[in-house]
């Protein structure tokens, strides 16, 4: 889905916007890598081995985050950043804006 999202954006943007977007994403990913390496360095100061069962916490919180992000998106709030992942084609939910337009059109035609 990321490839489709980037392809959709790149096809509609000018070259300067594409360059700025990729520079911004490169900077953000680099900053994320720096923080990850810093976190790893600080965690290696502890003298005991990493308990791998705690990876379950990572999986649990990742699932909670994904569910938290998708529930408002399914309900019609389209503040989610990936435009190619709209669920309105899978779920029969109309956004508030389209409902208001339909009501406006009905009131003005009668």
Image (cartoon, rainbow, N blue to C red):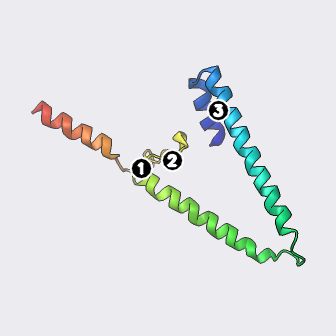
Per the model, the C-alpha gap separating discs 1 and 3 is 24 Å
Image location (x, y in percent) of residue 62: 63, 63
Residue at which label 3 appears: 21
Q: Earlier in the sequence, mark 2 or mark 3?
A: 3
SS under mark 1: loop
Residue located 57% across and 66% down the image: 64
Binning the other alpha carbons within 10 Å of mark 2 as few (below 14), some (14 to 19) or many (20 upward) gives few
Binning the other alpha carbons within 10 Å of mark 1 as few (below 14), some (14 to 19) or many (20 upward) gives few
The total of numbered circles placed on residues is 3
Query: Which of these two is toward me, 20 or 87?
Result: 20
Task: Please state if 86 lies on the left or on the right of 63 as rendered.
Answer: left
SS under mark 3: helix
State the quadrant of the N terminus.
Answer: top right
Residue at which label 1 appears: 77
Task: Please state if 88 lies on the left or on the right of 99 as rendered.
Answer: right
Asked if labels 2 and 1 touch by Cβ distance under 8 angstroms, the answer is yes
Residue located 74% across and 71% down the image: 55
Q: Is residue 85 above or below residue 56?
A: above
């Amino acid at each position: 889905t990321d490839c489709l999202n980037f392809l959709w954006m790149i096809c509609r943007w000018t070259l300067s916007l594409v360059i700025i977007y990729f520079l911004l994403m490169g900077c953000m990913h680099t900053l994320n890598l720096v923080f990850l390496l810093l976190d790893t360095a600080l965690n290696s100061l502890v003298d005991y081995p990493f308990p791998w069962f705690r990876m379950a916490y990572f999986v649990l919180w990742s699932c909670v985050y994904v569910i938290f992000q998708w529930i408002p998106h399914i309900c019609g709030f389209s503040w989610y950043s990936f435009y190619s992942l709209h669920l309105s084609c899978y779920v029969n939910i109309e956004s508030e804006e389209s409902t208001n337009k339909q009501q406006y059109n009905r009131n003005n035609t009668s």
